[in-house]
Image (cartoon, helix red, strand yellow):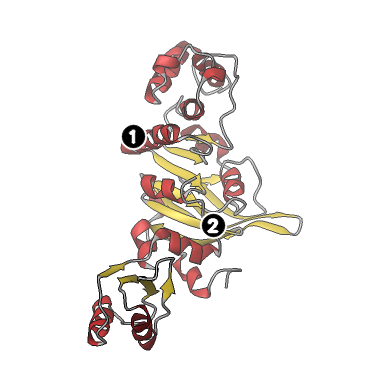
Amino acid sequence: MIAGVPAESAQAVRTPPVSAREFAIETRGLTKVFGRQRAVDGVDLAVPRGTVFGFLGPNGSGKTTTIRMLLGLAAATSGEIRLLDGAMPKDTRSVLPRVGALVEGPAIYPFLSGRANLQRFDAADRHTSPATRNARVDAALERVGLGHAAKKRAHAYSLGMKQRLGIANALLAPRDLLILDEPTNGLDPQGTREVRNLIRSLSDDGTTIFVSSHLLAEVEQMCTMIAVMSAGRLVAQGTLDELRSAGTARVRITTPDHADAHHVLAGLGLVPEIHGRDDVITAELSVPGLQPETVNAALVRADVRVRGFEASGASLEDRFVALTGEGFDVAG
């Protein structure tokens, strides 16, 4: 049993049945220990190629430490890492040129222009040719929508533009995999939208994108698959639909007969909940096999006046709270 997580939650963690050649990222038992603290504890990640993969968890759950180990910025205490079919850190020299990364925000020179920043970053890469540097820089700026601001000094950029400049740096060379740590952190709605649209367009071109975030709403809008971290452990992994279906459905009833409805629901083995309005009652369908239509029929038989009846699957927010034992920053 994972601390703070029901034992059944751990059953949601599994590796999809895909051959290793189809994984952009794969880890086995990845662990990082600082003194007595296990910051990352036995993580088994499986990120299929071509996906936008959300790496979700509250702040302090081990996401950034995991990313640093993936990129060789921190040594794992134990476990195995494969990036693009290469064993890390043994194959670092052949693998990392195919990986772009933005970790803990872009490091930029504020009094240089966007173009000058990228020229410096490109010059630091021993794999690039000076003869084609300007063409690469201009192409990266256009790719992230900063061509019009190429000559502007970076200190005058908005937060969204700075994030896009950091992603442009990651795109100076062709990349099979992008690893982005909190790419929308601290951005206003417009900046968030800019970065989200950029990530989608890069995915459409076939790049695998691994996005770490603590923002549930952003992950839902960008990602096709997700993994959830809590207290250093991987507590869920799969598609959005799989995680939603693993939760418990709910019913929402609007009725003036509050007491009678409460009695009927309790008689069916449900636990009614009140959410600020006397005429609204909700309940999880926690009884195996109990269907929403059975609940509605029981209310009608008891002469409960049902003015509204809504059945819904578990929300991702409910599911994540159940998995992690704490709330997520839903909106930012």
Query: What residue is disc 1 on?
Result: 201
User: What residue sits 40% from the left and 17% below the top?
Assistant: 147
Q: Is residue 244 above or below residue 257?
A: above
User: What residue sits 58% from the left and 23% below the top?
Assistant: 108
Outermost residue, right side: 35
Q: In this view, does 63 lie above or below 163?
A: below
**Chain-order first, disc 1 or disc 2:** 1
Q: Examine the image and state in which quarter residue 240 appears.
A: bottom left
Q: Is residue 24 among the parts visible in the rendering?
A: no
User: What residue sits 31% from the left and 74% below the top?
Assistant: 256
Q: Which mark is residue 325?
A: none
329 lies left or right of 306: right
| Number of numbered discs on residues | 2
> Residue 308 location, x and y as percent?
26, 69
Q: In this view, does 78 lie above or below 285?
A: above
> Residue 166 location, x and y as percent?
51, 28
- The crowd level at tag 2 (other Cα within 10 Å; few <14, some 14-19, many 20+) is many
77 lies left or right of 7: right
- 36 vs 311, nearest the viewer: 311
Q: Hey, what amino acid is under mark 2? A: Met
Q: In this view, does 240 lie above or below 106?
A: below
- Quadrant of the rendering where the N terminus is positioned: bottom right
Query: What residue is disc 2 on?
Result: 229
Q: Is residue 102 among the parts visible in the rendering?
A: yes
Tags 1 and 2 touching, CB below 8 Å: no
Q: Hey, what amino acid is under mark 1? A: Ser
Q: Is mark 2 on a helix, strand or loop?
A: strand
> Residue 300 location, x and y as percent?
23, 82
- The crowd level at tag 1 (other Cα within 10 Å; few <14, some 14-19, many 20+) is some
> Residue 295 location, x and y as percent?
28, 80
